[in-house]
Amino acid sequence: MPHIPLPDHLPGITGLLEYRLDTAMPIRELTQILLRGESTLTQGERELIASLVSSRNCTRFCTAAHTKAADILLGEDQTARAVLADPETAPVSEKMKALLQIAAQTQAPGSAVTEEAVERARKAGATDREIHDTVLIAALFCLYNKYVDGLATVAPADPAYYDILGDRIVHRGYVRPPGGYPAPAKTNG
């Protein structure tokens, strides 16, 4: 049960973002830029970073949502699971393994990011912007994870919910739809 009243039909971060539209707007905009904006990292790679950080923070809602988005963007469902299990053995490029190491170090805590990890990423072909964006995505998802868990939002148990949410993330991004998210229609009976 959430610590504050949130719309029943908007679990996880969505209900929190609807609760305070003024604070949600800059967070949504930053997320849209980082995960859907112009980048040399694919959208799927950026979702892998979000998934890994959320998993390491043990935030079930965000892990499920961003793993599903990564699955859709990558066109398969094995890579994200492999990244969550062990980024070093996952079927991703050496550059991505190095960036995932930086993301993991950012998560636990940011000061744990080592010069060796940054140098590894550079040797694997990562640009300064890719390193920057990896750290910022990881930091942003630490914020999201603490926000979701700190206010005890609901994380649906039904995997079908995350299929819908993943599709929404991939096809609409992180911007709020005009008029928000309407409550489901009530049925008589």
Image: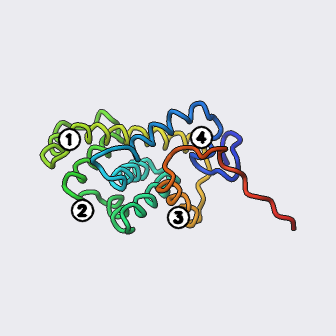
Q: Rounded to the nearest whole Å, what is the CA distance between mark 3 and mark 2?
A: 26 Å
Q: Is residue 123 left or right of residue 92?
A: left
Graded by Cα atoms within 10 Å as few (under 14), some (14 to 19) or many (20 or more), the crowding at tag 2 reads few
The quarter of the image holding the C terminus is bottom right
Question: Which element is circle 2 on?
Answer: loop
Q: Nearer the viewer, mark 2 or mark 1?
A: 1
Looking at the picture, tell me which residue is in the foreground, 96 or 37: 37
Report x, y in % for residue 136.
Answer: 36, 37
**Whether residue 148 is situated above or below residue 72 in the rendered picture:** above
Q: CA distance from mark 3 to mark 1?
A: 33 Å
Amino acid type, callout 4:
Leu
Residue carrying label 4: 17
Q: Which mark, by number, is residue 163?
A: 3
Residue at (30% x, 33% y) in the render: 111
Q: Is residue 187 left or right of residue 103?
A: right
How far across and how far down the image is residue 146, in percent?
A: 50, 40
Residue at the (39%, 48%) spot, across then down: 53
Q: What distance separates the C-alpha of mark 1 from that of mark 4? A: 32 Å
Q: Position of residue 56 (x, y in %)?
A: 40, 50
Residue 23 vertical placement versus 97 (above, below): above
Q: As drawn, is 5 to the left or to the right of 104?
A: right
Which residue sits at x=56%, y=62%? 164
Residue that label 2 marks: 89
Q: Give the residue number, with chain letter if any, for mark 1.
A: 127
- Which sits earlier in the primary sequence, circle 1 or circle 4? 4
The answer to which of marks 4 and 3 sits earlier in the sequence is: 4
Q: CA distance from mark 4 to mark 3?
A: 20 Å
Tags 2 and 1 touching, CB below 8 Å: no
Question: What element does badge 1 sit on?
Answer: loop
Q: Spatial distance from mark 4 to mark 2, Cα to Cα?
A: 35 Å
Disc 4 is placed on an element classified as helix
Looking at the rendered image, the disc whose residue lies closer to the viewer, 4 or 2, is: 4
